[in-house]
Each structure stands twice: as C-alpha cells, then as structure tokens.
Image: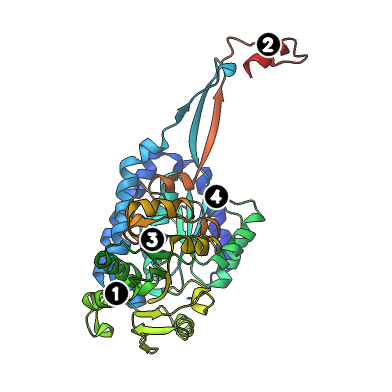
Amino acid sequence: MEETSKEVIIEHIKNQRNFFASNKTKSIPFRLEQLRNLKKAVLKYQTIIEDALWKDLHKSPEEAYLTEISIVTGELNNHIKHLKKWARPKKVHTPFYLLPSSSKIIYEPLGLSLIVAPWNYPFQLLINTLIGSISAGCCCILKPSPDAPSVAKLVQEMIAATFDANYITVVQGGRATNTILFNERFDIIFFTGSSNVGKVVMKAASQHVTPVVLELGGKSPCIVDVDANLDIAAKRIAWGKMINAGQTCIAPDYLFAHHTIKDELIAKIASNIKAMYGENIKASRFYPRIVNQKAMNRLEKLMKQGKIHSGGKIDKKERFIEPTIIDNVNPDFLIMQEEIFGPILPVMTFNHINEIIDYINKNEKPLAFYYFGKNNNAKEILAKTSSGGACINDTLMHITNHNLPFGGVGNSGIGKYHGKESFFAFSNKRAILSTPTWIDLPLKYVPFKYFKWIKRFL
C-alpha cells in the first residue's frame, strides 16, 4: 500500500474544514441521510466485503457477516432509529440561587475526525466508528490498515462512491502516513490498535490538545471456577478464543482454571475445537489465517515454553497455526508478557480466587474479563478487579449489545463507543445557561452589599 503524501493530507484537511464550516453536517436530516446512504452502500458491497475478508484473513462469509457486516448494519439501524432523541437538547436542573435562569446541554459535533483502524476486523472497526462520526455531525478522514489491503481498497472505493471527499475520505499507507496524520491538528482522533502505538497517538495528540479515543487491548483473563458448567464453559471459550484465529482484541488471552477441574476442562476445550472445525482444521473453510509472516514469527516464539496439550502445528507458507492449548504455564513465560493475538491458549491453575485477584491487579487492566462459575463469586471478583468490559459465563458477547459501552480502562484504552456512546464520543456536550433580562438581582455585584444573605443560599 503506497503512502499518502503530506501535501495530499493537508489538502484533505483544508477541504474538510471548509466543508464543516458550511454547517451542513450539523443538520439532523443531513446526518440521517448519510447514515442511510452508508447502509445502502454496505448492503450493495456485501459480497465484495466478504470476498476481501477472505483474501486478507481467510474469513468465511458466515464469520464475515457475523463479526463484521451485521455489527455495522445493526449499529447503523440503531443510530438511524435514535439519533433525533440523542441529539435533542437536554434540560438540566437549575439551582435556586440561579433562578430565574434555565440550564440545558446541547450536543455539537467536535469537527474534523481522524479514524485509524487495525487489520483484525478491518471493515467493522473502521466503519462502525465512522457511524459515530456521521451521527455526531463531524467530517472524517479514514485510515484503514495496510495489513488488510483488499479491505482497505474496497473501503476506499465504497466511501468514494458514497460520500463527497470534502466530507468523508480515505487515505492509505502505513507508518509514514500515520506519522503525518498524527502530527496534524484534528478535533478528535479515534485509534484502534496496540497499546504501544496508542501511546504514540496520545503523545502526538497532546501537541494540539486533541481529544482521543484509544481502543487498545491487553491480556484479557478467562477464569473457570470449580463450580462452573464445564461443558458450556469449554464450548464458549473455544469459540471466543478461535474466532478470527484468536486475532481479536477481546479474545480470552489466557485461562485460569481451578486445579481440580483443569484437566477435564482443557480436554473439553480441545474436543470442542475439533467439533467446530473438524479433524483436519487446516482444510476447514471456517478457520481463518494469521495476517502476515511477521505475526507468524512472533506467535511461533510464544509457543516455545510450557507443554503443548493439543495443536501446535504450523504452516508458515499458508499462514496457518493450529489451535493450540499450552499447559504448565508460568507467569514469567514470554507468552504471559504480551497480548497473544493468535489461536494459542496458555493455561494456569489456581486454588483460591484471591490468587487470581492478586495476579490480575498487579498487571495492567485488561480490555475484557471472563468468569465462569456461580454469580456470587462473579460479583466478588468483579468488585475486586477492573477491566474495560466483562462477561459472566460467556465470552465476547458483551460487544454485541448496542446498549453497553465498549472500551478499555488504563493501558487497555481511553473512551467508550457503540450506540449512543459513539454519538457522545464525537460530540461536545456544550453547557448553556440562559438568563432573562426582565430582572437583575443585585446579589452578585461588587461591593457584595448582601453578602451575608448570599452565604445562606450557597
């Protein structure tokens, strides 16, 4: 993917600032029209989107629809249905000492947004975020990942055919293009990717005091307690870990199993993986591939320590890594030092829930958190730990509820989106106090003649 020059980027920014200054995007009917146009485009390009995801990641049309296309169309439907309500000025209480003034909050677009998306869900994570920008009334520059080139090209074609480039446009490139973009002034930057790059984005944004939403990642724990339903837990863990070949920011990163059920549990997980993908997993059209050789080499190194319980086969030419469960893992192993982002599940054991709480709390706060067991224990462990989101007796599914905010905390991210949170992410909550002129109480004026009375009301 060729880099985009600084001159082209600056021209896009200038044109979009001029378009935003026309106030056209502030119209609710205009925003709704653009959301409907985007939905038509997604449906029109659906087959092309599925083909591109197959070329880049070997995603089946079924997985492409479930994890990318349907999430986008569902988000579009939600915004189209509720935008008028979300954008309506909100009256708030005015304290006694400010009467007869009235107070309200209005929601105005931040302005020019930059959205930088990763390669693992290259369509969904780019377009789902764009929905929030459109809904709030912003102009937008989109930057897809060069590591999913087929999707990047089709998105550019789809956006160009659907929107005025002065309103929404796509720029292509890798690190050099990102560097140029991050050094320019935007009104909001929305970045999805690694924590390391997120820090670079935040540092660059600070030069212009630009607000950021950072959707990062981390090592999301999956705990299976002694009283969990092992059949259900094994099936849901196998699915959550192996979807997109584990290249999911909220995938269960490592497994903490109670020592009395660990062997039975991982045997059931391995069995469920075969039930889903077949004995010859490499031949399954439902099993995706690793994005590139660099990722293959990194994942191969992570498999060197511990005992491989099942899986372990690698075909670098086909970018294939068999679903792999690694037993006898220690916290100081390399695989426990970084987010895995692949179909490898390291397993550790515990005797008491406090061991898990201590382990999680001494490390960075994760993006997701999964617990299988009774609700009372779940409440305790949630109360004593922190994460961006969580599921009890399931994995990944919290991301599918438009009414739940999605995002990280601490090292796993800043800011939330999905549903109305996406509208808020690209909006400025503007506080308005309206005071009539038919009365002008002297209480606030110097020389504070009525100060002793003012003190009684404050």
Choose mark 2 or mark 3, whichever is in front: 3
Q: Does residue 37 appear in the picture of this structure?
A: no
Q: How far apart are marks 3 and 1 (CA)?
A: 19 Å
Secondary structure category for the residue under label 3? strand
Q: How far apart are marks 3 and 4 (CA)?
A: 43 Å
Q: What x and y, as percent, mark residue 151?
A: 37, 70
Q: Earlier in the sequence, mark 3 or mark 4?
A: 4
**Front-lying residue, 397 or 290:** 397
Picture quadrant of residue 280? bottom left
Query: Would residue 348 be found to the left or right of residue 114 on screen?
Result: left
| Image point (55%, 50%), residue name | 17
Choose mark 4 or mark 2, whichever is in front: 2
> Where does label 3 land, which residue?
370
| Image point (52%, 79%), residue name | 334
Q: Which of marks 3 and 1 is nearer the N terminus?
A: 1
> Where does label 4 land, which residue?
17
- Quarter of the picture containing the C terminus is top right
Q: Which colour scheme is used?
A: rainbow
Q: Which label is found at residue 264?
A: 1
Q: Distance between the residues labelled 4 and 2?
A: 50 Å
Q: What x and y, as percent, mark residue 56?
A: 36, 76
Sort mark 3 into few (<14), some (14-19) or many (20+) by Cα contacts within 10 Å. many
